[in-house]
Amino acid sequence: MQFLVAIHLPDDFDPSKEAPSTIKDISALNEEMIAKGVRVFVGGLQTATRAKTIRARNNGGMVVTDGPFVEAKEHVGGFWVLECESFDEALEWGKKATVACRAPVEVRQFMEVPPERLKARAEAEARAAK
């Protein structure tokens, strides 16, 4: 099962001002995740002020606006994608992440679509395209 561990950071977060101890703790957590074979991907995001939100209109048009979809004081600033045996295991990694990052984290499981459902969908789309 794959899980998202999202780090919520304030809008004015500046990674260049991160305390050396925090950087050390996050690096150690990354090394532990790699050693345990759970880390699939890790990434940091630009500030929410650099985001764009795109909305499709009923008439086929698009509207692009500056900023994130939701107005808030905190946004996802980085994340891990983890491969874990259970939600409880992912929560344990989330607990380590909130300590290392000194920020709140959110743990969410990715939806899993059974392979037979994907195959049926692909076959239906192929028939419709003929």
Image (cartoon, rainbow, N blue to C red):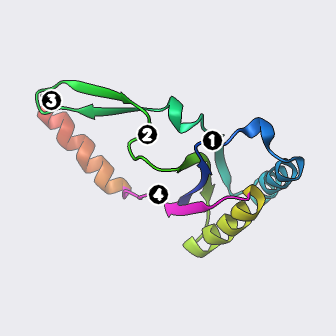
Q: Are marks 4 and 1 in contact (CB under 8 Å)?
A: no
Gap between marks 4 and 1 measured at Cα: 29 Å
**Counting other residues with Cα less than 10 Å from the Cα at mark 2, is it few (<14), some (14-19), or many (20 or more)?**
some
For the point 46% across and 50% down, the residue is: 72
Q: CA distance from mark 2 to mark 3?
A: 36 Å
The residue at the point 56 percent across, 61 percent down is 106
Residue 1 visible in the current orientation? no
Gap in Å between the C-alphas at discs 1 and 3? 48 Å
- Comparing marks 2 and 4, which lies closer to the viewer? 2
Label of residue 68 in the image: 2
30 left or right of 122 in image: right
Q: Specify the label residue 12 is tagged with.
A: 1
Most frequent secondary structure within the magenta stretch? loop
Q: Which residue is mark 3?
A: 129
Whether residue 90 can be seen here: yes
Mark earlier in primary sequence (1, 3):
1
- The stretch of residues the image draws in magenta is 102-114
Q: CA distance from mark 4 to mark 3?
A: 29 Å
- Residue at 75%, 64% in the rendered image: 99
